[in-house]
Each structure stands twice: as structure tokens, then as C-alpha cells.
Amino acid sequence: AQSVAQPEDQVNVAEGNPLTVKCTYSVSGNPYLFWYVQYPNRGLQFLLKYITGDNLVKGSYGFEAEFNESQTSFHLKKPSALVSDSALYFCAVRDMMPDQTGANNLFFGTGTRLTVIP
Amino acid sequence: DGGITQSPKYLFRKEGQNVTLSCEQNLNHDAMYWYRQDPGQGLRLIYYSQIVNDFQKGDIAEGYSVSREKKESFPLTVTSAQKNPTAFYLCASSIRDRGFGEQYFGPGTRLTVT
């Protein structure tokens, strides 16, 4: 079984300050972790992913995420927030069993709405 | 929204009518997916297809049907059996690999049933 939790429905941060959007996961096999962003009335846009290797993953628009296996977390971060970063952010996980192939089914969290205050 | 089109953007239907949502991709992806998005619930998987002429039920398939006759097309029909069809529907596609690939999403269709 796989799941992700985004414990904060809403995060507010002042423009120019660092931001963090939290995500924790639960999987049976190896976790493949993803972050997506959604602007109003739009589809989701891929930001970054962790498959293996370096625990700090860099992605689009200056975002990065840190994979922490001991805490089963994959928090999204940005050193300096922009007003244009205001959007809905989704964490997702694929539970990758060793012999599994095929569809890349993802399990999504409930989303965190980020508001950057000018 | 990266090579995936969904039409129409807004759709209004009367209760009891079936309605079909279109999803087309030109990314040459084998796998395609349909999600439903409701406020506060994230995305929930309705159906997915790994290859032409094959599809599988997701977590909330009841009241929905799909077809995959062509690689680039994966239409979703919301039937009258779906008890609460008003939602934002998202289509996605990906390469078919061992899980490394991200999904690419269309712009979505907002369905309102009254």
C-alpha cells in the first residue's frame, strides 16, 4: 500500500522569504516521489522527482526537494519565494516493487495551497 | 500543458445524460490516465491504459467508462450511473517504463451536472 500526506492545507509566506511545503510518504517498496504544481483552472505541471541517488533534487523554477528516508519525507523548498509561486502544490508517490513494470500509477496527496504575500 | 489537449474546457449537462470528455496527446506516450479532482481531496485515479486496446480500473471507476482504440486518444464517458459527476477532470500521459517517468497533464475539463 502507498500513501502520501501533505499535513498543511495552506502555507503563507512573505515574498523573498524561504518557503517549505511538506510531504511525508508511506510505501512498501522503493519510493519514487514527485512534486507537481497547479495554477487555477489548469492541469498539473511537473516540478521535480526523486528516483534514486542524491537526496537533494533540483527542479523547475528554482524549486528543490530533499528526500529523507529516515523521516519518510520529501519536502519542497525554495530559497526565495515569488508572488508568482502562489499555486496549489501536490506531492505524489509511486510504490515501486522490485519486479514491477508498466504503468506509472501515482498516488497523490490532497494538495497544499501556497500563498506568497507581496 | 505539454502536448495533451482536453476538450471542452467547460461542459454542462443535465442529470441523467451521458457525456464524453475528450483527451488527445501527441507525445507518443503509451500510457494514459484519467483523474478526477475535487476540492480538498487531491486527484483520484478513474481509469488508466498502458497500451492500445487495454485499460484498467482505477480507484473510482464506478459510473465511468473509457476506450483506447488509438494510441493518441483516451476518451472518458461519464455515465448517468455516476452519482456525483460534477468535478474537474484531468487527463495525463506518460512513457511506459519502470516508474521513472513523470506524467504530463492536460488543461482539464470542468464538468457541471445539474
Image (cartoon, coloured by chain):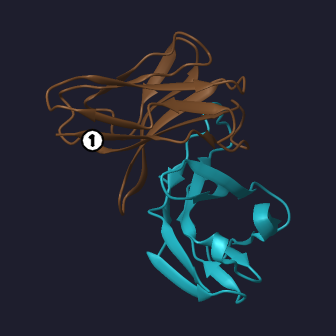
Chain colours: A cyan, B brown
Left or right of residue A73: residue A80: right
In this orientation, does residue A8 appear?
no
Circle 1 — which element?
strand
In this orientation, does residue A77 appear?
yes
Image location of residue A18, percent across then percent down: 71, 86
Q: Nearer the viewer, residue A54 or B104?
A: B104
Q: Chain of mark 1?
A: B
Q: Where's the N terminus of chain B, which quadrant?
A: top right
Q: Nearer the viewer, residue A61 or A6?
A: A61
Residue at 75% across, 54% down: A51
Image location of residue B43, percent across then percent down: 44, 51
User: Which residue is denoted by mark 1 in the rendering?
Assistant: B112
B108 to B69, vertically: above or below: below
Residue at 14% across, 27% down: B16
Left or right of residue A104: residue B85: left
Q: Where's the C terminus of chain B, which quadrant?
A: top left
Q: Nearer the viewer, residue B19 or A25?
A: B19
Residue at 61% across, 28% down: B31
Left or right of residue B14: residue A13: right
Residue at 54% across, 78% down: A115
Crowding near pointer 1: few (<14 within 10 Å), some, many (20+)?
Answer: some
Q: Residue furthest right?
A: A54
The amino acid type of the residue labelled 1 equals Thr
Image location of residue A113, percent across then percent down: 49, 71
A95 to B60, vertically: above or below: below
* Residue A65 in which image quadrant: bottom right
A118 to B114, vertically: above or below: below
Image location of residue A73, percent across then percent down: 62, 73
